[in-house]
Amino acid sequence: MLRAAVTALLLCIAAGAAAQTYPTKPIRFYVGFSGGGSNDLVARALAIKLTEIIGQSVVVENRAGANTAIATELVSRAAPDGYTILLNAPGHATNAALMKLNFDPARDFTFISKASEAQNVVVTHPSFPPRTIKQLIAFSKTRPNTINFASSGTGTTVHLSAELFQFMTGVKWVHVPYKGGGPAAIELIAGQTSIMFANMPTAIDYARNGRLRALAVTGAQRAPAVPDLPTVAESGVPGFEVTTWTGVSAPAKLPRAILDKLNADINRALKSPDLHAQLTTQGADPIGSTAEQYTAFVQDEIAKWGKVIRAAGIKGDQQ
């Protein structure tokens, strides 16, 4: 008994000493999507600011595929030393209901802080005839199962937004998933698909320069970044509302001292005027939190979306 107590005390002392000097080398920041999408944009903006704050490089690495499950599994198996962190997206909450996972999305992670929230924006190729949500519904009903919509992957809010829209309006489209919002938007611009319920940071600049046409936003209220754009709800689909989010996590059993430091540094970064302005301009609202608040949020999201996906019978990629 005494030996066990001494061992535990020594481990605590070692963890505390490590936390006091942390970080002493670069931190790997994994993103489960390809470059150019909204999650990648948030991660890179946050990484730059964190690099300034902590004095060590925070390096973004993209590991796309399986609605973030590839990157998430990689991080779940990493050492809980603060040098491997993950940008969470809604896929972290939806994957357990979509596919067989080799990790537990709740128990295998230390949730550090929420990072941002954003609306999705309904965008179409400029040659696609509908210019309003009402026109989109009417046009789609005359062409069931012939119009393609792009998404950043099965089970993402980009995908589920469109599924909810179809359910609420009675239209029927064909889903074309990609490994991230960036590739999906590029294919939409190229005319390979017609519609996308894109995360706003992914598509807002394309809509501003005319490469895509924006019809509406998916939140309960108009977005400050595009105040003239109506919501889907006010455009003819009452009650429609979908938002997306990001946050930061690490492997389970991250020492509390390192967790507290990362949480403080992330929240400091999110409150900085330059990062706040950069994300807001792109349609993402910086939102920090305590570790406990973020943990409870993710657990609630896992339960909520699990019920929705199972009820709708949505199947994911078995990767």
Image: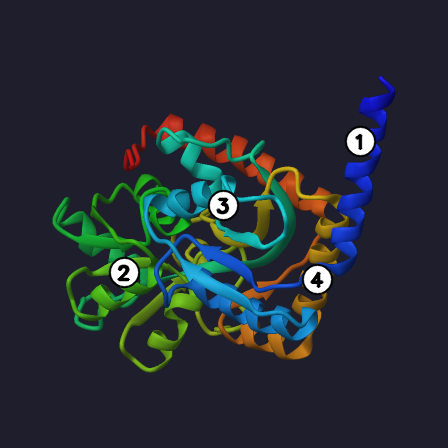
Q: Spatial distance from mark 2 to mark 1, Cα to Cα? A: 50 Å
- First in residue order: circle 4 vs circle 1: 1
Please name the residue that numbered disc 1 is placed on: 8
Q: Which element is circle 3 on?
A: helix
Instruction: Please say whether residue 160 is visible from this viewpoint.
Output: no
Please name the residue that numbered disc 2 is placed on: 184
Nearest the viewer among 205 and 32 is 32
Q: Residues within 10 Å of mark 1 (few under 14, many from 20)?
A: few
4 and 1 marks in contact (CB < 8 Å):
no
Residue 7 lies left or right of residue 200; in this view the side is: right
Q: Nearer the viewer, mark 3 or mark 4?
A: 3
Q: Which element is circle 2 on?
A: helix
Q: Nearer the viewer, mark 4 or mark 1?
A: 1
Q: Residues within 10 Å of mark 3 (few under 14, many from 20)?
A: many
Residue 187 lies left or right of residue 100; in this view the side is: left
- First in residue order: circle 3 vs circle 2: 3
Q: From what the image shows, is residue 42 above or below residue 164?
A: below
Please name the residue that numbered disc 4 is placed on: 267
